[in-house]
Image: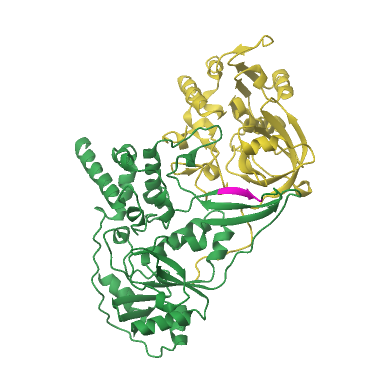
Chain colours: A green, B yellow
Amino acid sequence: MDKKKLSLVQFKRVRLNEKQLRNFTGFLKTKGRVYAPHRKGEKSFSFQEVDDPSKVVFNYPRTILPLKKFFQPPIETLLEFTINDNSYELPDIDNKNKIFFGVHSYDMQGVLRLDYVFSRGEPEYNYLKRRENSTFIGISFEPDEYHFSGSVGIDVENTEGFSIFIDIVDEDNYVVFACDNTGEELLKEYGIKDFESGEYKLKEREFKAKLKYHYGRLPQIFEKCYNYDVWKKVSERCLGCGNCNLVCPTCYCFDVEDDVDLKIEMGSRTRRWDSCMLNEFAMVAGGENFRKELYQRTRHRLHRKFKYITDHYGYPFCVGCGRCSQYCPADINMVEVVNDLIKEHEEREKVYV
Amino acid sequence: MDTVLAKEKKILYAPEISEIIEAKFLTATEKFFKIKLPGGRDLKHIPGQFVQVSLFGVGEAPISVCSSPTQKGFFELTIRKVGMLTEKIHELEAGDKIGIRGPYGRGFDVNAFKGKDILIIGGGIGIVPLRSLINYIIDNRNDYGRLIILYGAKSPSELLYRDELKMWEEREDIEYHVTVDRSDENWKGNVGVITTLIPPLELDLENTIAAIVGPPVMYKFVLLALKSKRFPEKNIYMSLERRMKCGVGKCGHCQINNLYVCQDGPVFNYLEVKGLEEAI
């Protein structure tokens, strides 16, 4: 708790009411395209380009899709070709100024993890170019029954990656922190002259959903859990639909396909989001499938979240947003699955040690 | 605030349009292509590496290079017809164009193998990437000890590179053994699975490298046969096949547990994949 306070206290801040915050959102539109949460259905929200600042939702549990859709679009043209002369052109990649307003800490962490993936090894120009000139403005949230980012080391008030962070005190009371120079300049340009500093009392926010172990202890579970019963138990309910992959902020696997026009003269090579939960994902030429059972795919997906990439990244590749749990048609809950693994681990260790 | 910057505009997914300079069928299902990169530039690959081969409108797939890097100005592929893309590639002839990206992956460490005896075990089209290694060793023959080649095919008609097989058989400095699962009326050689060739071998176990490529089922039996000879596991290398969409460790398709075949492989030391359930 003290550490959290400390990190916010170091920033200059200003108090805005709802009208002022909406005005500020409108002002941001002079700086680039602004994307913010909008109401989509009765209970669903989505990051959309801001047209009318009065439509922006400040207090929301989570959007359906995370921010990856802006940097690695669901369908992306890699090249446009002409079949007859074997020529192709590379599409221009839009790197104009973008401001993402109202981002939750776990979604920011999702973007930072994708940055790692696409700049590691062979850096990927398409992603990195599209990612350029992006400014992020964070906002606090009240954890619901699905959020568990606290368990993977991401507090509500984690400001890493943000230029500005907004703490929602109540619906007409917002405390806006300038987390870096870009943020401070934006606030000044908007017309803020006097900043406050010093002591700031933060609201207590408790995560209802929690992993039983600190995330630092998960690698030791994943070291041993490969043949645990949990995988098969979960897969009895899993439909193998791949929804969890699509809504996950740190899932980035893709497929590449060629599309041609009806005259079969021109076409494009596109990449699309893919899903390791689908049966075809690990299939090779000739029909051999190296993860043909559903439990193997479930196990693979969770190992990608808590073991494989974590081994070199240092943190879980799950940001605790709760989307996979909320949008699972079979009601499979990530926190429950990991806690079941922990439980099985404890039982087995007791038996065998 | 940007922690990442798009550096040079190097598009990972842009193929080089290359020219097919020779094309011929080796069997009913395998076709051989000699390919020239733009300007006759060398591919600069290592035996065991692969390229992403593409045809616009159809798609792209990883294919092992079957020629040795000691040959300059061109490289060679042998492609089995297994799906839509390879079926279309089979229609191509000399003069046609094809898209190439790569080379990718980790090949055989030919420098580390210097001074060692090399035991090649190839089953079916597993001989394709091994041909690159074999020809590399033949072109640098003094750098290596014995060259033992075990080659198995389902039937005599499925044997690839028949001119070269004859040469391997005739050369004094190559110990070549071939077997087929099913013989035909003209076949006078061994009949049986490839593992039958292993027990009679006399090997200097500590100084021999085994390079194995074949279908998944073959690995299990070859590994068992080597084990009963007390062949050191650390000296065994194998190449694994997966579907790949990017070749550069991003798309996720080729992942075996924590390993990416396109980056960590396709050639693995046996000890690296030994405990991995998803490997074979």
**Residue A151 quadrant:** bottom left
Q: Position of residue A98 (x, y in %)?
A: 51, 72
Give the vertical position of A180 relative to B7 (above or below). Answer: below
Left or right relative to A54: residue B200: right
Q: Nearer the viewer, residue A41 or B22?
A: A41
Magenta region includes residue A257? yes
| Quarter of the image that includes the N terminus of chain A | bottom left
* Residue farthest bottom in this picture: A193
Q: State whether the magenta stretch is mostly helix, strand or loop.
A: strand
Towards the viewer: B118 or B212: B212
Residue A313 seen from this side: no
The quarter of the displayed image where residue B74 is located = top right
Q: Which residue is pictured at 44% across the width and 33% down the height?
A: B274
User: Is A119 or B22 nearer to us in this picture?
Assistant: B22
* B182 on left or right of B173: left
Which sits in the foreground, B89 or B209?
Answer: B89
Left or right: residue B263 compared with residue B140: left
Residue A10 counted in the magenta span: no
Which stretch appears magenta? Answer: A256-261
Where residue A14 sits in the image (x, y, percent)? 35, 84
| Spot occupied by residue B194 in the image (x, y as percentages of width and height) | 56, 19
Q: The C terminus of chain A is located in which quarter?
A: top left
Q: What residue lies at 44% left-to-right and 89% top-to-bottom?
A: A191
Counting from the top left corner in percent of width and height, residue A203 is at 24, 74
**In the displayed structure, would residue B142 be above or below residue A74?**
above
User: Is residue B265 visible to the viewer in this orientation of the structure?
Assistant: yes
Against B267, is B191 above or below? above
Name the quadrant containing residue B5: bottom right
